[in-house]
Image (cartoon, rainbow, N blue to C red):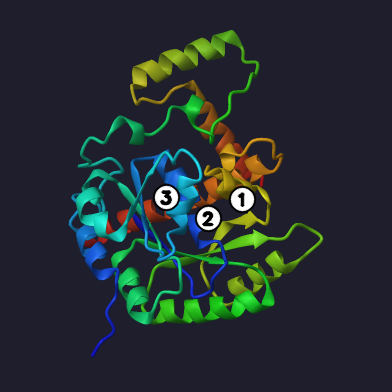
Amino acid sequence: MAEASKYSKTLDALKQRPGQSDGPLRANVAPVPARFKPRSKRSDPAWRAYTLMLKSETHTKAGIILKQMDTGQDLSDLAQELFEEWVKAHS
Amino acid sequence: MIITVASYKGGVGKTTTAIHLATYLQTVAPTLLLDGDDTRNATAWSENGKGFGFRIADLNSAALLAPQFTHVVIDTGQRPNDADLKALAEGCNLLVVPAVPSGIDTVGLVQTVRALRECNANYRVLLTKVPPPPEQEGQQLRAQLTGLNIPLFAAEIPRLKAFDRAFHTGVHVGEVKGDPNAGRAWEAYQTAGKETVQSWRKQASTQKLSMR
């Protein structure tokens, strides 16, 4: 007789979840209790606040462009993306 | 995404890896950690503190809870049998295999990789408890595995006391206070988490292309 796996039932249940195989990250996810929602950057230990100097004109223009793009990306997301690319390119 | 953390070898940091990958994934989308370990190590870790940002449950709760979560991490704990490994290989997007770079531990890694290859699993080895320089074991194991075409995380997890402190205070390592290495330890798992998400996105886009 074939050996049984204690994970079979669990994995069958997980397969039944909607939109998991190839959908976007948040597709078809039912609302979750507030305490399980992703943290804000300030309360997320992955992020830390730093002070850096930027030319005010650049800061203003970047803010306007981000608003026009309306992707939900903010200045710190943009800075993170640019820094990450730079670090990747130089390591 | 469903991730399983598994290895035939004990003490390689399976629970630590499961907890920290779940912590990272929770910053991306709602995440559930299924504690498949009979000794409930992940649950015990959580109960040492105020709980984690993600949800922990046992395997029996999967059907009820899973629809609420985008990502599921399964901690297999003790050595899974062949049937477990086969089921997990077929049912997961990625199997993460933690491996400690030391001679004795490598034997268990070889057995695990052989079994995963037989299952045609999508797996990736994560080097854990990597000793600091001048010790070379981490680099040596990486070179060996690369030479054998075994998929590896670019990230590797340093051997640090901060993880013990995290367990005893029931927090993830990034929240350990008064340990100068805690940030470095958390950054290592964040990098591994990012690689996991990138791998899943790549897998998803390949699936989409093949369905067209």
Q: Which residue is mark 3?
A: B197
Q: Which mark is residue B16?
A: 2
Gap between marks 1 and 2 measured at Cα = 8 Å
Residue type, label 3: Val
Above or below for B119 versus A87: below
Locate residue B55, reporting x and y percent. 36, 45
Mark 1 and mark 2 residues within 8 Å of each other at the beta carbon: yes
B49 vs B136, left or right, is left
Tell me if label 3 and label 1 are in contact, CB under 8 Å.
no
Q: Report whether residue B82 is seen.
A: yes
Image position of A18 with respect to A38: above or below:
below
**Quadrant position of the N terminus of chain A in the picture:** bottom left
Q: Nearer the viewer, residue B209 or B39?
A: B39
Cα–Cα gap, marks 2 and 3:
18 Å
> In the rendered view, would you say A36 is above or below B112?
above
Three-letter amino acid code at the position of disc 1:
Phe
How much space separates mark 3 and mark 1, taking CA atoms? 23 Å
Q: Are marks 2 and 3 on the same chain?
A: yes
Are there few (<14), some (14-19), or many (20+) residues within 10 Å of tag 2?
Answer: many
Decide which of tag 3 and tag 1 comes sooner along the chain: 1
- Disc number placed over residue B163 in the picture, else none: 1
Question: In the drawing, does residue B182 fall left or right of residue B196?
Answer: right
Helix or strand or loop: what does disc 3 sit on? Answer: helix
Q: Position of residue B6 (x, y in %)?
A: 45, 67
Mark 1 and mark 2 lie on one chain; the one further toward the N terminus is 2
**Which chain does the numbered disc 1 sit on?**
B
